[in-house]
Amino acid sequence: MQPLTNRSKAVLQKEMTFAEKLYLPAIINGMIITFKHMFKKAATIQYPEQKREFSPIYRGHHVLKRDDEGAERCTACGLCAVSCPAEAITMQAAERKEGEEKLYREEKYAATYEINMLRCIFCGLCEDACPKEAIFLTDRLVPTEFERNDFVFGKDKLVEKVDDRVDVTKRQTQNVIDFKQNKKYSHNK
Amino acid sequence: MAKVTIDGVEMEVPDGTTILNAARSVGGDIVPPAMCYYSKLEGSGGKCRTCLVKVSQGSTNDPRPMPKLVPSCRTTVMDGMVVENITSPEVLEARKGVVEFLLINHPLDCPICDQAGECDLQNLGYKHGAAATRYEEERRTYKKIDIGDKIKLHMDRCILCYRCTYVADQVADGDRCHGIINRGDHAEISTYIEKAIDSDFSGNMIDVCPVGALTDKTARFGSRVWFTKPMDAHRDCDNPKCSGKVVVWQKGEDILRVTGRKDAYHEVDEFICNTCRFEKKKASDWVIEGPRHINNKSVISANHYEHLKDIKEDVEKYQRQVASNINKA
């Protein structure tokens, strides 16, 4: 068969020399490399006590944002789910009842919202598709679990807590921030 | 018979045909969009102005152009007429303006609206509109109204095409209790103090509504249209006027919504009765014929698989076409 690249080498099975048969020089060589590394700067860190610096646009654990009044922004429009290449997102919409205006921003809300973190490829298309600035990927890591079912994150793990907000301003460009503060637009009045 | 040329395509149509219907007899890009005209409703058309076209030659006898753009749904053809639709920049500019006006009071709540994905105004906006709004004032708002216990009216979204009132008049028999009150900016669809419409065919106003002003309460917020599978289905309906031929929108085995079968211009082939539309929501009620053909440009076609048989037929048709072209050449 013709080789695909010219990097492949035929395996030689020639007789070893006396020095090679001793093995000791090879072992010492190896040990020198090992001991040298003891005095070098470690490549690893002590996670979780120490954490590496994340890129401001790192795409990790999703968050479903609340607005300034604490109402959920998601309106279950389904654009994240239809844009998701991994089909990881499912949701069920419900109609807001009277008296729930403080809880949900719009007339319709997501009664259930689930992301299967095993399917998710963290591409961020859901964040791009969202017309309500409800879903963001954050620089938090998705925790490890033992059961498959535990990776299906519901609203309890996705919606941010009212008293423990997730900061996503680093992800927004100046254009977006200006758009959100411009008094010309009715959504800022 | 009259010979007309629309966007360079020549056709012969009977006298008295409108430009819009002449264009539809050929189909394709030369067909002007229409928001208020509905071929199955007598008297519809002439209100929304999205179908404006330019008549660059009136007729063979009088070849002068018409002074203004004309609504193609209300203008009849003349022998030797030359019409420009998308080939005229003037028409495209005017249409852009019309879309902007239609959107002045239309709320941008597509993420909430059940019609999103099959909305004529959404398609029109994408095709002919501008990307951003210049409108800064408050939009007019109304309270939501229940028309009967099965239909929800969001007056905010209404573009006053009058189609639903024609349905109430012509399709749904009975006393006329559904119409438009007030005028101009204050005009509003009303049922005379929210009086329920109890005709068997009142549900058709949901199908004819080009926007999400009239929606099915039994399927309200059930699912976005692109997550449901449209399937052709039929049943033996007791109502002699109802054909029982519908599209059921399924999610898994469940039927979330039943609508009429809409053609390429989003007009239903046959009107269906309220029993079929609102009450038959079990798969056992229907004989399912197969997946409905959905244009692959539509968001509804996402994850929608049609019969391989149909695709095979399409491929064979195409092959025959290619073969005949080769033989000709």
Image (spheres, rainbow, N blue to C red):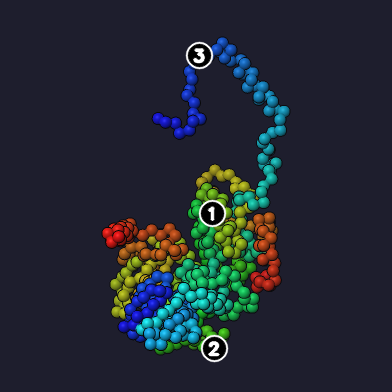
User: In the image, which disc is placed on residue B282?
Assistant: none
Closer to the chain start, of discs 1 and 3, is 3
| Few, some or many residues within 10 Å of mark 2 (<14, 14–19, 20+) | few
Q: Position of residue A117 (x, y in %)?
A: 54, 50
Q: Is residue A18 visible?
A: yes
Quarter holding the C terminus of chain B is bottom left
Q: CA distance from mark 3 to mark 2?
A: 103 Å
| Comparing labels 2 and 1, the label whose residue is closer to the camera | 2
Residue pictured at 35% horizontal, 80% vertical: B3
The residue carrying mark 2 is: B183
Residue pictured at 60% horizontal, 61% vertical: A134
The residue carrying mark 3 is: A15
Report whether B20 appears left or right of B181.
Answer: left
> Which is more toward the observer, A29 or A11?
A11
Residue pictured at 35% horizontal, 85% vertical: B16
Q: Amino acid at mark 1?
A: Ile
Indicate the secondary structure of the residue bearing disc 1.
strand
Indicate the secondary structure of the residue bearing disc 3.
loop
Q: Quadrant of residue A70?
A: bottom right
Q: Amino acid at mark 3?
A: Glu
Q: Amino acid at mark 2?
A: Arg
Q: Chain of mark 2?
A: B
Q: Quadrant of residue A111?
A: bottom right
The residue carrying mark 1 is: A115
Q: Is residue B24 visible?
A: no
Q: Chain of mark 3?
A: A
